[in-house]
Image (tube, rainbow, N blue to C red):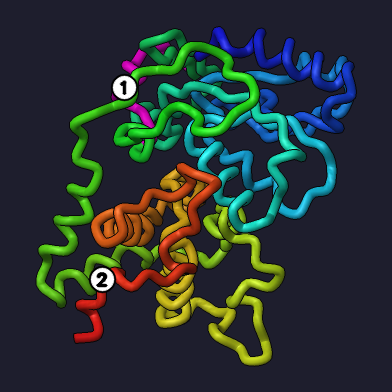
Amino acid sequence: MLEYEDRIIELAETLLKDRRVDMVIGFRKGTVPMMNEPCFIKNPEESRLLVWDSNCGINLANYLMDRKEKIGIIAKGCDSRNIVVHIVENKIQREQLHIIGVPCKGMIDRRKITAMFDGEILEVSEDAEAISVKGDGFEESVKKADVLQENCSICVHRNPVIYDDLLAEKVNEQIGLDRYEDVRSIEAMPAQEKWEYFEDLISNCIRCYACRNACPLCYCPTCFVDESRPQWVGKGQDAIDTRTFHFLRAYHCAGRCTDCGACERACPVGIKVRAFTKKLEKDCLALFNWEAGLSTDQRPPLDVYRPDDPDEFIK
């Protein structure tokens, strides 16, 4: 994907010079390895700051809600699906956007790489198949396929679903994957074991709300955790409040989540937050044949009524 970088810079520069957009939302190099930063480019000469590699996992659709400008945005498959969700939910107008589509081959998981080495990682580079890691006293190469984010390793929508410019030929979509093996293993647990699984899953949560803040779907003017009239959850570390936060946030994403992995990527303590949203994604696919963000012409299943909707749950 490194070959995309020059094309991104060229397109951003042209869009800004021709005043077709007021800004371009993309990535610049971060201050630490494997942590590229979202940036807002407003002058053509700033386009040189833009980068693209396997450390661009943050979902840029998170920066679009309720903006009034004409915006250019760089979007991989999951980003583009969240853009579709925003268009459907009237958080941004399609006419405001110039979408630079990026066929994606997956983003790397910095936690997997960090766990492989004892010393501090000082530099990370990549080619098509491998990630080169340099640190104090070590230099090694690992296969990119072995260190992908979990959501990327099972992604079946790697190409943008909506775009104005496509940076390259579409990549082959992954087929024959079992995307919900982990969900089924949890579903098969006895009730007590399932309870203990989720209690253990969120036991390290510090209620920083990084998962909420990174999620493109969490745009309520006042989140339920911040409501005071009435107060839904407490502000401390009470286990019931923590549990309430995670389950309610997941249900707010039902039928809307694209499994972009932004929540897990942002979590400072490494909680596998997708364990909640993947179950709801699986159920929407099974019950309604629905995957979020694939069409601007369809409403999500939970905000429409159809006479043939499944109703076993009320029997």
Which secondary structure lies at badge 1? Answer: helix
The quarter of the picture where residue 198 lies is: bottom left
Would you say residue 105 sits in the magenta stretch? Answer: no
Instruction: Work out whether 257 lies above or below 161.
Output: below
Helix, strand or loop for disc 2: loop
Q: Earlier in the sequence, mark 1 or mark 2?
A: 1
Closer-to-camera residue (44/286): 286
Q: Nearer the viewer, mark 1 or mark 2?
A: 2
State which region is magenta: 136-149
Residue at 42 percent across and 27 percent down: it is 106
Q: Is residue 230 left or right of residue 131?
A: right
Residue 5: x percent and y percent?
Answer: 63, 13
Q: Which residue is mark 1?
A: 145
The residue at the point 42 percent across, 37 percent down is 111
In 3D space, how far apart are the residues under numbered discs 1 and 2 (Cα atoms)?
39 Å
Residue that badge 2 annotates: 310
